[in-house]
Amino acid sequence: IFVTFETEKAQREVLSALTVSKYNVAQNNTKVLPPEHLFRGSLVLDVAEATEPSSIRWQDLEETLFQKLKERIISYSLTLAVLIGAMILVGEELQKDIGAAAVMIAVFNIVLPHILKFINGFESHPDEGTYQASLYVKVCTFRWLNTAIITAIYKPFTSTIAESGSSLILTVYAVLMAEIVTAPVIHLADIMGHLKRHILGPNAANQAAMNMNFRGSAQDLGNKYTSASKVLFLCFFYSAIFPACFYFGAVALFVAYHTDKYLLMRSWRPLPELGNAVASLSRLIFFPLALVALAVMSELYYSSYPFDDACKTEAVVTATSKYFGNHTLFPASGEAPVNVSVGVGDTIYDFCDEDFLSHLRTLLRFFERDYSSWLTSDAQDIFEFIFGLYAVVAITLMVVFLFLRFVLPSFMETLRGGYSTKEKDSGKLFSDQPRINAYVPQVQNPHFPFPLITCEKRNTEARHIGWVDPLRDHSYYELSSDIAALFEDQEDDPPEKQALSLVQYYPPSVEAPTPTHGLSDQQPIAARFDEQSYGSVEAKGRTFSQAGRSIRRLLRLEKS
């Protein structure tokens, strides 16, 4: 049940009075609330502040925990398969042609998120904010792997700072140039958008079909956040060996900003009001993880310099040494042979594995004070210690931050509950707003330009729906009218009373009825309080997936 109040004051009073811990809700502990606050005198309701009406996914509200778990297993299994397949393809191309691999990475960063969006569609989410957050996790993980990590895995360790064309630094440079040039060009081309507007639209059978081709391309906020985070992560990951990546990254972000701004104003369709779920996830988890990557990778790259797998020994070349004389080296890469001369007194180097990815122990080297023998100077020793200490501090702060920000609040909410807010009461009234959305159940259908209204409306106004069709009235999209027409010959009540939700509007001029016991499911919650004007919009009943389920459903409250 969703309830919209006439004033923010009434909403906050209800939330303060009815919000209890998750544990007490699960145990139906009636002792934590006064008897008059119990639903039907015996039930503790799960009360929470709802997200914006336009972001509610009505068809997913009543999925069971088992169904959600099954959907998550399928979704993440398919995502893992896509990640592995993309990494194999990019890795093989990196060993052949850096330029082609950079273009492939840029194309994959544009195309594969659409596949991940299709996979994410298997999951049920109560609102668009959590749906976009789930998509953000998948796409961001893929783009971080595809853009930065896979390059470090597949490139030979000794070619990290090599002068040859297969150098890791040149590969990172090629990837950044692809983000500056290739990705914006593909976005601006908007091939499907032009196809719909210039070919499919003008040749449509009717006006409604033509309008659907002019709606613009659908975009995902989670996908857009990952576009910025992948560039930032790439720069942090390789900044120790390629400091210029910050300049190229700034240009890439500048170009992406203006490209998206142009398309948002000219080509893309509007996004629903999603709340701050994606922004919070990006700001509180992924950006701190990027800082941890900066600390750890800087320590590892500084400790591995000069990336030649050669450790200096105390021995020197003598006249009787087998290394003394002139030699011809044949590079394994197939490049031209190199002539070298080894003389008396030259230092002898032994092979040693400097690659921090080859064994686990070197990944934890910053916990040790006895640094490896390949460090070339005291300055490198000092820098390695500083970055090692920085990495330890960054990881520790990250773990403590995640615990205090997410784990502890969730634990306290489960055991204690309660409601509080720092937002100031605006004093505005719901009924005074010329256009404001109410919780009217709607479902998107690809064959209709506007959502289908899956509820029975009583005394509601057009301004509560959230959209206006210039060609047809809202009744054209109401499923209750279709159901009533199909069953008009039946004597019993039409099926919409059992299958569809009920949306009831109580204007401020109408006095709310007084409950007979506790909170009745037939009266608005606002009737519990001494307000001069109670006006509210109440959505209750069942959607298609909710039909036949228990009356103990989630109660959601939203401010005006």
Image (spheres, rainbow, N blue to C red):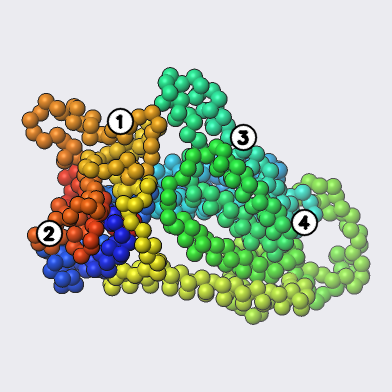
Under circle 1, the secondary element is helix
Residue located beneath label 2 in the image: 515
Residue found 47% across the figure and 42% down from its top? 270
Q: Is residue 13 shown above or below 147?
A: below
Q: Which of marks 4 and 3 is nearer the N terminus?
A: 4
Q: Nearer the viewer, mark 4 or mark 3?
A: 3
Residue located beneath label 4 in the image: 162
Whether residue 264 is visible: yes
Residue type for callout 1? Tyr
Q: Do the residues labelled 2 and 4 touch (CB within 8 Å)?
A: no
Q: Residue 189 carries which label?
A: 3
Give the camera-side residue of 5 and 311: 5
Residue found 25% across the figure and 64% down from its top? 14
Q: Nearer the viewer, mark 2 or mark 4?
A: 2
Residue found 30% across the figure and 30% down from its top? 476
Under circle 2, the secondary element is loop
Q: Nearer the viewer, mark 3 or mark 1?
A: 1
Residue 194 percent across, percent down from the top left: 56, 29
Q: Earlier in the sequence, mark 2 or mark 4?
A: 4
Residue located beneath label 1 in the image: 476
